[in-house]
Image (spheres, rainbow, N blue to C red):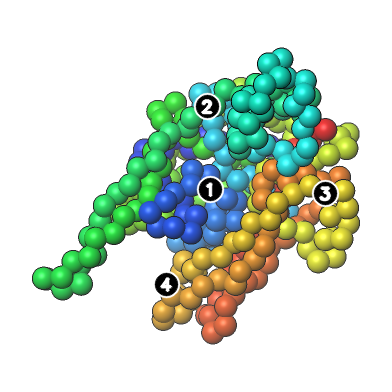
Amino acid sequence: MKYRVYKMKFNTAVHFGNGMLNESDFIFKSDSLFSALYIESIKLNCHEQFYKCIEEGCVSFSDLLPYIEDRYYIPKPNLYIDTNNLNKGDSIEKKKIKKIKYIPVDKIDSFLSGVYESDEEKFGEKFTMSKAYVRTKEDTEPYHVGTFKFYDNAGLYIILAYKNEKDLEIIEKLLESLSYTGIGGKKSQGLGKYTLLNSKDTETLIHRLDLNDKKVYMTLSTCMAREDELAKSLDGASYSLIKRSGFVDSLNFSEEPLRKKDFFMFNSGACFVNKFEGGIFDLSPFNGKHPVYRYARPLFIGVK
């Protein structure tokens, strides 16, 4: 596989749902990105080509992960780290390391050696938008929407793994089109708009992706093994699970909003001894007019 890295510099705040309307995450999961890209591909009449290149494994991608300037952050590996090697050796620094969720890719070796000292990088700030739901001319009901606003020097990046340029062009076209539509929730209110940029200084990141001689590999995407892969993938694995659910974001699926089937996935940062391919799972609720897919392919990076 070949790799390409793109930055998303956000022009507006974002609302990435975490189960509460008045809160927002700042990370966008790969399965949610797949859904957004698929809906965009229907608009551009290239959904068959898009689905084919993903389903056949010609293209896979990471979660949208944070960057600052030209420094790329990856999930903290879900591994036990001996922090007794820290120079300070104090409990405060150990607690800080325990709390961090993302580390610079160029610091992965020092982190795994237990000598990494956290720098508490901040990617942006959380805000709350106040809105009013109008029932009648006389009756309005206020509500609050949680948002996240990235700093000017920060944003999210995506790693694309691809086999040929033709498939890459399809994904690039969709990512560019999606920048005007927006990603996440409350797009109709102007949230989630971004500018797509080519990334620089990605050598360290791509080198890690190319490593095939490691004993442990970490996934940079939210994923799940197929049934025939699951037992082997769990052997020696260290992971946390995340429940993925939500409503079907399609006007053609049903006359009223329907929830997708709940689906448990490996959270990004999960570590495996045995790689697996994962897949695309059909999680359509009953009485829908078309399939509802959940993207669950891993993108592995060598860590240990």
Q: Three-letter amino acid code at disc 1?
A: Phe
Secondary structure at badge 4 equals loop
Q: Three-letter amino acid code at disc 4?
A: Leu
The residue wearing badge 1 is 28
Going 66% across and 26% down the picture, which residue do you hit?
91
Answer whether residue 169 is visible to the viewer in this image.
no
Secondary structure at badge 3 equals loop
Quarter of the figure that contains the C terminus: top right
Answer whether residue 304 is visible to the viewer in this image.
yes
Mark 3–mark 1 distance (CA, rounded to whole Å): 24 Å
The residue wearing badge 2 is 121
Going 57% across and 39% down the picture, which residue do you hit?
65
Which numbered circle lies on residue 193? none
The residue wearing badge 3 is 237
Q: Three-letter amino acid code at disc 3?
A: Ala
Question: In this view, which residue lies farthest toward the top?
Answer: 87
Secondary structure at badge 1 equals loop
Q: Neighbour class for label 2 at 10 Å: few (<14), some, many (≥20)?
A: few
Sequence-first tag of 2 and 1 = 1
The residue wearing badge 4 is 251
